[in-house]
Amino acid sequence: MKNSFYTGLALGFVGIIPFTFNFLVARSFGKEILGSINITLSFCLIITIFITNFFGSAGNKYLAEYRGSRKLEHFQFVFKVMLGTPLIILSIIAVILSWNWIYFSNKFSLQTDLLIPIIIYIFLRSFYILFRRALYGIDLVKSYTVNEILSDLIMLSAIGYVTYNKHSSLLIECYLLSYLIFCLLSTGTLLKRFKSIKITLNRSNHFDQRDVIQKFTHYGLVSMIGTVASTGTGYLSIIIIGMYLSNSDAGIYSSVLSIVSVLMFIPKLFTQVFLPEFSKLFGEGDRLRILQIFKQSNWLMLAISTTVCLALFFFAGNILSLFGQEFSKGSTILKIILPSVFIRMISIPYVSFLSGTKYVIYPNIGGIVILVTSLVSWIILVPSFHLIGIAMGYTIGIIVGIGYQIIVALIKIKTFHTVS
């Protein structure tokens, strides 16, 4: 329960940051600069999600597993792989970007003077996620929460200062400062607690590096593919706008995604509750209780989703005008994206059921379906419908991918009925 509380608290701060950043940038500098900075951030994030999801997910799992089984060599090896290997990969990426910067900056509408900040951002963002996953794997959730809140408060102060003083050239540096503070705090936490954790572990006579690497790689690939596919869709949509439309369009679209990101806090929060509960009950073999919780949570999420999405539909223009009057024209985009928000919310019990039992592969497949469907839709729709085509492609991808997950969950739930 304590970990759930700390996780919810940290998620609250994590969710506030992108919305506040986009809101203040929009109010202070307008849609052109908002679009430009979001194209830059999306370019960075589409690179980092491969590294953070592969090494972060596998590292989190096996740090926890080997700590639980008290295997010292296994634990230390996973820790080194999790934090050491990304350093090498990120260095190679930095060299590639440096050698081909003119091409990348022209192709993806990036400012030519942002090479160094972008490279630093990619490093710091990656280790921000990796340290976060490591602290969870070592069960230092409280420490992570404190580090997260402190670095987020510094981020809020920095963006407040930058926007108030109209320093639009320092926007990405706000993130750099926040991530740097988090990485320093987390390094201090690990240095302080690592010896006491090692004392509780035992040396093993059967340590096989190849076996650990195989397990790490398999889990990392499986968890990465689906997560990258579904998460990367949002980043890709902004990058495509930067490549084929304009910074102003990217700014309007970013303001819409800011609203969506706040709403996505609801699925994240409820997933933190439902997923471990389903996993616990599945481990206990209590199928009847799983079905009861599934039905109750299904009706709860349906009621919340309907209320929230209907309110947004009717007041879309008013809400977006808070970013500035020029953003109110994005109300059509928000209304097009709302069905994707609705289906994501109502899918929480279904996806939590699949991930919390033995069907974790299906949410990953759903993520791939989302990405592929969105890409195909954008190719067809963007030339004719421009920004509306981006929103339509995003929504179609989510509906098809999440719809697949819901259908699979319903089929597997019937098996639960049959067995019980």
Image (spheres, rainbow, N blue to C red):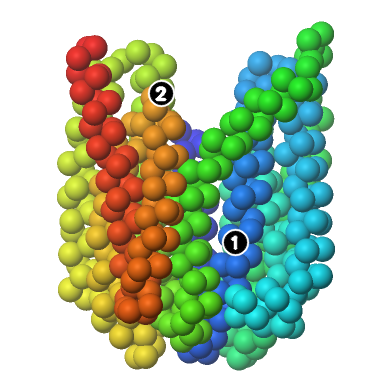
Looking at the picture, tell me which residue is in the foreground, 376 or 9: 376
Would you say 313 lies left or right of 196 here? Answer: left
The image quadrant of residue 112 is: bottom right
Marking on residue 358: 2
Instruction: Tell me the element at label 2.
Output: loop
Residue 227's spot in the image, x, y percent?
50, 46
Q: Which residue is label 1 attached to?
A: 45
Badge 2: residue crowd in 10 Å (few <14, some 14–19, many ≥20): few
Looking at the picture, tell me which residue is in the foreground, 169 or 48: 48
Query: Residue placed at 32% from the left, 78% from the top?
Result: 385
Would you say 283 lies left or right of 242 here? Answer: left
Can you see residue 345? no
Looking at the picture, tell me which residue is in the foreground, 364 or 32: 364
Query: Residue placed at 43% from the left, 54% from the top?
Result: 371
Question: Disc 2 to disc 1, how far (Cα)?
Answer: 30 Å
- For badge 1, the amino acid type reads Leu
